[in-house]
Image (spheres, rainbow, N blue to C red):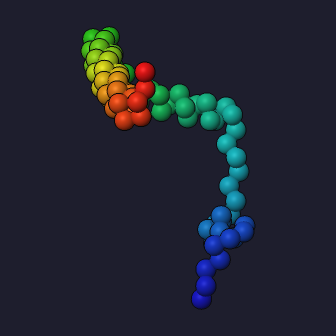
Amino acid sequence: MAIDTRGETADKPSGEKKTKRTSPALFYRQVVAELRKVIWPTRKDLISYTIIVLVFVLIMVGIVSALDALFTEGVLRVFGGA
């Protein structure tokens, strides 16, 4: 027996009723409840994570800049730039 994979029947599992939409107030309460479960970083953690990210970004900028200069020099030598 073939399974219909197109149209409205593909979106609804068979036998389940269509559920109502969540009200904005209930959605907000659920969001607040989930945010209370989050383990927020301390100021010390936040500063160290920020420094790690900035150092990584600076390293990547250096690598990309070096590759750009290398490829630019190679293209100019191959095609005889000024």
* Horizontal and vertical percent position of residue 62: 31, 20
Q: Nearer the viewer, residue 15 or 13?
A: 13
| Residue at x-position 48% and y-position 33% | 34
Near-viewer residue (81 or 59): 81
Q: Image quadrant for the C terminus? A: top left
Q: Residue at x 67, y 31 (%)?
A: 25
Q: Is residue 56 left or right of residue 13?
A: left
Residue plotted at (28% across, 17% down): 55
Query: What x and y, as percent, mark residue 22?
Result: 67, 42
Q: Specify whether residue 38 is in view.
A: no
Q: Decide which of 50, 80 is in the foreground and name it.
A: 80
The image quadrant of residue 7 is bottom right
Q: Residue furthest bottom?
A: 1
Tell me where residue 12 sits by quadrant. Answer: bottom right
Q: Position of residue 41 (x, y in %)?
A: 33, 19
Along the horizontal axis of the image, is 16 left or right of 62? right
Query: Does 70 sit left or right of 13 as displayed?
Result: left
Residue 55 in sight here: yes
Q: Position of residue 5 (x, y in %)?
A: 63, 73
Q: Quadrant of residue 58?
A: top left
Q: Where does the N terminus fall, quadrant-wise?
A: bottom right
